[in-house]
Image (cartoon, rainbow, N blue to C red):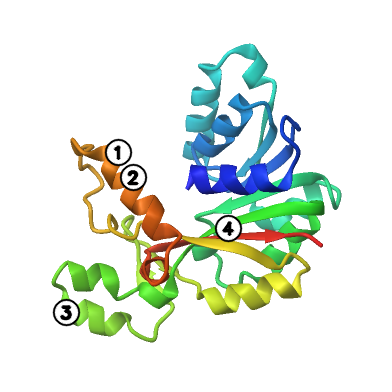
Amino acid sequence: MARQLDEQIAGRFPVGQRLRVLDVGMGQGTQALRLARTGHQVTGVEREPTMIAAAREALAGEPVGIRDRVRIIEGDGQDTGVHFLPGSFDVVLCHGVLMYVEEPDALLAGLARMLAPGGLLSLLVRNADALAMRPGLSGDWAGALDAFDTFSYRNRLGLDVRADRLTTLTAALAGIGAPLQSWYGVRVFTDTAADDAGAPDDLAALLAAEERAGRTDPYRAVAALLHLCGVRG
């Protein structure tokens, strides 16, 4: 997914421009640090103390120039209007967050307000149109049947969360002034892999296959996750 995001950034902003990035639900800071290493100024918002601690620990191991480009704020993605002025960022990331929000429309509208004109909104969501794939490919036929025509599922942390449909988010992005520009599938072939599975010997081929499938119909439509990119008008 990092390559997809870089592709969208490269296609939208001049080469070498140092972007103002907001990472909502930054987790342990993997994406924030990656972008800071490439010269961008990143503000991360996270509410979980364990994730904030992990992000700060990772940041502490970076050179001072990179540390100075990352700011961490303890808070909720729905409170961006409290911390920032409208139009404060060129790129807003919201990866793996919407599934924990029961009614995401207000959150999405708030994120769009944070974008400067021409700014990029990057979303990573669970694909509601493919919820039967994981149990089906695992041989859990009852689970697969239950997954049809639903928006809810139990994630690998054992939490009951929700998924989103591409058509619904496309309409939502249009309604908040950041219409969908492109979308990709993520984890087309690898969603059933164990969390502790080691890297295979043919990792490069696996990544190439996932990358190709993630941008090719009909494969991307049944990916476990969807990566959507909207642009502020």
Q: Is 144 above or below relative to 206?
A: below
Packing grade of label 3 (10 A; few <14, some 14-19, many >=20) is few
Q: CA distance from mark 2 to mark 1?
A: 5 Å
Q: Is 81 above or below relative to 72?
A: below
Mark 2 and mark 3 lie on one chain; the one further toward the N terminus is 3
Mark 3 and mark 4 lie on one chain; the one further toward the N terminus is 4
- Residue that badge 4 annotates: 123
Give residue 37's position: percent from left, percent from top. 59, 25
Depth check, mark 4 against mark 1: the one in front is 1
Give residue 32's position: percent from left, percent from top. 58, 35
Packing grade of label 2 (10 A; few <14, some 14-19, many >=20) is some
Depth check, mark 2 against mark 3: the one in front is 2
- The quadrant where residue 103 appears: bottom right
- Residue that badge 3 annotates: 141
Q: Is residue 186 visible?
A: no
Packing grade of label 4 (10 A; few <14, some 14-19, many >=20) is many
Packing grade of label 1 (10 A; few <14, some 14-19, many >=20) is few
Q: Is residue 190 visible?
A: yes
Mark 4 and mark 1 lie on one chain; the one further toward the N terminus is 4
- Residue that badge 1 annotates: 204
Q: Is 80 above or below relative to 162?
A: above
Q: CA distance from mark 1 to mark 3?
A: 32 Å
Residue depicted at x 80% and y 58%? 113
Q: CA distance from mark 3 to mark 4?
A: 30 Å
Q: Give amino acid for label 4.
A: Leu
Give residue 12's position: percent from left, percent from top. 71, 48
Q: Give amino acid for label 3.
A: Trp
Query: Which numbered marker is on residue 207?
Result: 2
Q: Give amino acid for label 2.
A: Leu
Q: Are marks 2 and 1 in contact (CB under 8 Å)?
A: yes
